[in-house]
Amino acid sequence: MAISIKISKTPQSRIHLCDFDNIEFGKIFSDHMFRVDYKNGAWQNPEILPYGPISIAPSLSAIHYGQAIFEGMKAFKSTDGTPLLFRPTDNAKRLNVSAVRMGMPEIPEELFMAGLTELIKLDQNWIPTKDGSALYIRPFMFATDDFVGVRPSENYSFIIFCCPVNSYYPKPIKVKVEEKYVRASTGMAGFAKAAGNYGISMLPSYEAKKEGYDQIIWTDGNNHEYVEESGTTNLFFVVDDNLVLTPHLDGNILNGITRNSCIQLLKAKGYAVEERKISINEIVEWSKSGRLTDCFGTGTAAIIAKIAAIGYKGNDYILPDAEQRVVSNYLYQTLYGIQCGKVEDPFHWSVKLD
């Protein structure tokens, strides 16, 4: 069934204010946004309107009790200038997984896709074409009850807005293994892309940055023995150039779409890929013996974030030169090439908005 979306175009585009050669990640926003509200048990009144402030009550349920989830995805331009979306229905499915865990209503996939498609078509001129850049897309949902009480909200808003971006991490990063704070544990919402999961990461990330690190590696909530994910990415470790390991999905880490894409690409290339528990002690031993030949994070914003050093118990374990790494360089070139339509897409991941 066709979904009717009211479209109100901005009277004056702000695109002339954007310097596409010098974009600061997450600070410039395209002209429009999509919004649909959940009231009386149904999603209603979908519309595209000019990007701008939204009115909220001081007693807004999401602010007080944390019912807020989001997604991260990107739009690219193919070689002929057509907008391309990368695995958008996977983002819709994952948003609904998060919604269920947070006691929020699921949004129909066809409504998600209809709003997303119309928005990207309307703001397609905001998609940068510089190498390494893209139009970052932020779908999010939050509780909108004007009520101070601990219960699931009865009303919600779902919004999508966009911002042109360059590389999230322009150079290899230093990460510190977190041994004090915990992001998630069994029975919590570590697998959900919930706002609170990122809120609790701010202090440990800040403390790590004061010590000279760019990010942290979260560890398990029992003994801080096993790695889980980084602050913004899933994690991969390459041993002896041919064995690739990544923490298995145990409910504590995000089921990354970029993570899944990398696993499929690696297996198709003939690499052995293991999804299992990975201990810090293993990583240290691999590094000391010279067997840890690559280490990187994967995520929508970063795509592939090469890790230059891992800090643990006062020591920095240095990784090989980033330019010489085979696995992470292959993944970045292939994945970004597929996203831009420059490399064959055997998995049919890209959706072309004709």
Image (spheres, grey):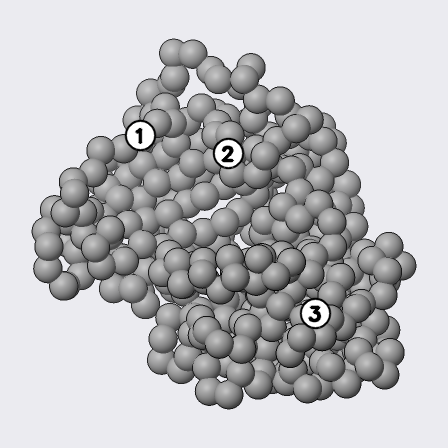
**Furthest residue to the right?**
324
Q: Which image quarter: residue 136?
A: top right
The answer to which of marks 3 and 2 sits earlier in the sequence is 2
Determine which residue is flagged by label 1: 53
Front label number (1 vs 3):
3
Mark 3 or 2: in front is: 3
- Residue at image location 54% in from the left, 17% down from the top: 17
Q: Considering the numbered disc 3 on the image, is that residue within a helix, a strand or a loop?
A: strand
**Secondary structure of the residue carrying numbered label 1:** loop
Residue 62 falls left or right of residue 149: right
Q: Nearer the viewer, residue 130 or 175?
A: 175
C-alpha gap between disc 1 and disc 3: 40 Å
Evaluate whether residue 297 shows in this view: no
Label whose residue precedes the other's in the sequence (2 or 1): 2
Residue 140, position as x, y percentages in the image: 37, 47
Q: Left or right: 182 with respect to 311?
A: left
Q: Which residue type carries mark 1?
A: Pro
The reply to whether discs 2 and 1 touch (Cβ–Cβ < 8 Å) is no
Look at the picture and state if 130 lies above or below 59.
above
- How many residues crowd mark 2 within 10 Å: few (<14), some (14–19), many (20+)? few
Q: Which residue is mark 2?
A: 27
Q: CA distance from mark 2 to mark 1?
A: 14 Å
Work out how far the residue at label 3 is from the one at label 2, CA to CA, in angstroms: 29 Å
- Answer with the quarter of the image where residue 256 lies: bottom right
The residue sitting at the top extreme is: 11
In terms of sequence position, does the residue under pointer 1 or pointer 3 come before the other? 1
Query: Does residue 164 appear anywhere in the picture?
Result: yes
SS at mark 2 in the image: loop
Q: Which residue is mark 3?
A: 310
